[in-house]
Amino acid sequence: MRASFVFSEVITGLRRNVTMTIAMILTTAISLGMLGGGLLFVRTIDKMKVSYLDDVEVTVYLTEDISANDQNCTGEPCASIRQSLENNQAVESVVYEDRAEAYERFKRIFEGQPELVELARPEALPASLHVKLFDPARSEVLLQEYTGQPGVANVDDQNKFLDRFFNLLNAGRNGTFIVALIAALAAVLLIANTIQVSAYTRRTEVGIMRLVGATRWYTQLPFLLEAVVAGVLGAIIGLGGLVALKYVVLDRILAATGGAIPKIELIDVLFPVAPILLGVSIIISAVTGYVTLRLYVRH
């Protein structure tokens, strides 16, 4: 009997303030959707770090005279540079690439831009040593050691490019979280305002219930559940928006990157993002509702 009464009061409260309820649900959905987007950013960045750091190399580009005259890297100073790298304890492997091989790799990379390939010539590309490290984080040491050595034109550290790339992604993630925080603040204010209005419109019946012996907790429970129900509905809509965004927008954008950014799978949205959003919606709604009732509702 008591459960059915509480349930009916929750439904009545949500219907009585329907416009504020809809606004509360939509604002909660937007904030949780942005939070979910930020979590997907984090998951995607972690996947990319695992994938890319395994393939990070330091490329030692050789000077023009070596590139033109030492096709197999057997003469000096190319042989000495290669031997020094192979003996370095931080180095896992060293692969020499002459001009012809560099040109073939260039054509594979830019096969979708035939006009660029036509303009390139093998003699424009330098020979190089591709160095794979056991720990890519130590690439800076190798960069300092070999930059400026005889026979070395320059040293390219892929780790630096990845750092800039991940910093850009992290900035996008942080921006998403900031927008989510602002939207969450608006949702909290709406929840608090909705509960105050709902309690005010039912102040007479709540007062009567208190007079006949109902506890304060029992009279306030329907208002608390209203906030939780609205929060859960907002979380469900937010999750639905993320799933729709994945199929309608993100899949096309990520496919256009040619695999540079890993595809977001449905399981990435459903776990662990979905449980987190549902948990956050329940906690925020319940805490906001409880605090509002304690501070502003005296019955």
Image (cartoon, rainbow, N blue to C red):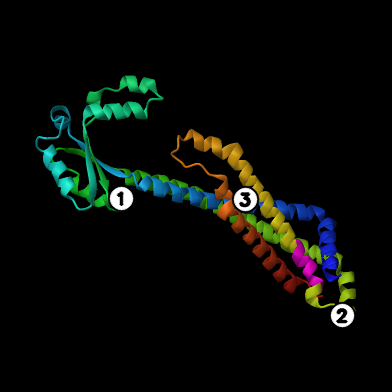
Place residue 101 in its image quadrant: top left
Q: Element at badge 1?
A: helix
Asked whether the residues under the numbered discs 3 and 1 touch, taking CB atoms below 8 Å apart as contact, a structural biologist would say no
Q: CA distance from mark 3 to mark 1?
A: 35 Å
CA separation in Å, label 2 and label 3: 43 Å
Which quadrant holds residue 246? top right
Mark 3 or mark 1: which comes first in sequence?
A: 3
Q: Is residue 194 left or right of residue 52?
A: right
Q: Residue at x 35, y 28 (%)?
A: 108
Asked if 127 appears above or below 179 in the picture, the reply is: above
Q: Which mark is residue 124?
A: none
Q: If you read the primary sequence from the N terminus, does the residue marked by circle 2 or circle 1 appear first?
A: 1
Residue drawn where x is 35% and y is 43% of the image? 161
Residue 222 falls within the magenta-colored stretch: yes
Q: Secondary structure at mark 2?
A: loop
What amino acid is found at the position of numbered circle 3 in the picture? Answer: Gly
Q: Between 89 and 12, which is closer to the camera in this rendering?
A: 89
**Quadrant containing the N terminus in the rendered view:** bottom right
Which of the numbered marks, if any, corresponds to residue 33? 3
Callout 1, which amino acid? Answer: Pro
Q: Quadrant of the C terminus?
A: bottom right
> Which segment did they paint magenta?
219-226
Q: Residue beneath label 1, please?
A: 136
